[in-house]
Image (cartoon, helix red, strand yellow):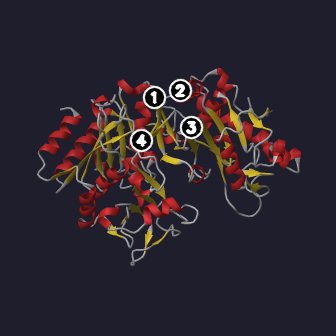
Amino acid sequence: MELKAALTDAIDSHGQIRKNLTREESIKDAVDRKEALVTANGALATWTPAPSTGRAPLDTLIVRRPESDSNIDWDSPNNLPVDAETFEMLWADALSVLAAKETVYVTDRVVGADPAYALPVQTITDRALTSLFTLNMFRDVPEGIEESIFAKRGFTLLVLPYDKIDTSRYEGRLRELPDGRTSDMAIVMDFAKGLGLVYGSAYGGSVKKLIFTVMNYYLPLENILPIHCSANENSNGELSLFLGLSGTGKTTLSADANRALLGDDEHGWSGNGVANFENGCYAKLIDLNPEKEPEIFNAVFHEDDYLNHGAIVENAMMYPSGKFDLSDDRMTPNSRASYPLTFLSNIKPSSTGNNPKTVVFLTADANGVLPPISRLNPAQAMLWFLLGYTSKLAGTETGIVDPVSTFSRFFGQPFMPCLPHIYSDMLGHKMKEHDTVVYLINTGWSGGPYGVGQRMDITLTRAMVDAALDGKLENVKYQRDKLFHLDVPVFCPGVPSKILMPENTWPDKNAYKERAIKLSLEFSDYFDKAYGNKNIDDDVRKQCPGK
């Protein structure tokens, strides 16, 4: 029997199906079933087992089938294969577990705010809280869904968050743990069959990121570019995208009282413009400051009747009073909250917009050698899109500690399964087609590396972002940073011209050159390892620092 048909039969024969409940009904069930506690402000709090406090990348698998195999970059460390026979065994085992559940929840939602390519997603689970998560994060089925390119090829997701795999059946098939045991958790995507399975992970992000990865596979094959970014627009409808890894300032810089938010994480760029994938946000809570991030804080911790609230607070420290200590990371530094976009004050309800006028790549270079702002032509933008560079601090022990370079292709490597040129070529094409300007903004160090220089002042970074978004850098002169192949403005409103070329800020020019050359060679080495045998355009290869 076909896998999807077997699931349909399992649902049809089950005696207690709770299908497409209202949000209030899902909240009530989650509380009544003791899957979550009501907090002092009316949100819901839940805590997961230790292995489910974050993603499980080593247990996140892609089914190898002839129909999808040639589109996937199997050299990428995050694209881990599993054979079809093993997946079909897992699916059959999961259906047996589902059949024994007292209650089964089913939601029919879509991912994608543009009805032209909204992906129908049916989620089946035994947990009311997982059902509520899909109501928070996925979108209502829109009118005209039958016109979607995915109308007849929707995706089905089966989620058993608290059940564990019978590992005796999967020795040699699933991951072997360091102690020799077999992993009892699997998050699996079968792109060809339109099926997903979350088996043994109670982390909400497993559901969210699985579907994000699915969209990142399907959309490029339809000439739609999926982007891991936030998106906002000004009062004239001019749209901007912000891409950046953790610590680069993406959330802070894209939050602007004068610009309406389409979404904070996942978007598609089609011929119609940009559309958010999601209905909500899944925000980090550790050390969340109500003064620095008032929108997120209010979305999660505003007071309301619990049946109206429904924000899910995951793995944060809560006292018996129902109040939180968001600085306590003893359980995990990855505490999270899921809430609808409507809990934010300045959003665009449609979550769709025009083709972007400006795209901002954010990096935090702790070496202090990248310019604070650069304009990228299409080939340069494709290169930096492939690199997805930032740097993290190795530690803060005595003395100066060298930063650690971090590369995450397309600023979201774990979730980008296709061959790399598919994404980069599409970005370059869309930039040319829509006259989109891309800027690289370095929110990291100036005047020296971490431990010597200073972090770029946020007010100066904001001035650079504003100048880029407002078109004030379109007609200024630029000079070439020959080592990094970047075009740097000689003037930016509100920013001292001296800091625009990083070498000018270093008292020791020789130290600057040594550090810059060292970083450029790291870029070159990474590019060769990741893309040396990939179909990357020669004009893009030439833009790589160190080449």
Q: Amino acid at mark 2?
A: Met
Residue at image point 80% right, 39% down: 490
Tag 2: Cα neighbours inside 10 Å, few (<14), some, or many (≥20)?
Answer: some
Residue at label 2? 426
Foreground mark, 2 or 3, reads: 2
Label annotation for residue 277: 4
Tag 1: Cα neighbours inside 10 Å, few (<14), some, or many (≥20)?
Answer: some
Label annotation for residue 428: none
Q: Amino acid at mark 3?
A: Arg
Per the model, the C-alpha gap separating discs 2 and 4 is 19 Å
Of the numbered discs 1 and 3, the one sitting upstream in the chain is 1
Asked whether, in this view, residue 331 is left or right of residue 239, the answer is left
Label pair 1/3, CB-CB below 8 angstroms: no
Per the model, the C-alpha gap separating discs 4 and 3 is 20 Å
**Position in image of residue 3 (x %, y %):** 23, 35
Of the numbered discs 4 and 3, the one sitting upstream in the chain is 4
Tag 3: Cα neighbours inside 10 Å, few (<14), some, or many (≥20)?
Answer: many
Q: Is residue 159 visible?
A: yes
Kind of element beneath mark 1: helix
Which quadrant is home to the C terminus?
top right
Which of 324/412 is in front? 324
Q: Amino acid at mark 1?
A: Pro
Asked whether, in this view, residue 107 is left or right of residue 536, the answer is left
Label annotation for residue 220: 1
**Position in image of residue 282 (x %, y %):** 44, 53
Residue at image point 37% right, 45% down: 187
Residue at image point 26% right, 59% down: 24
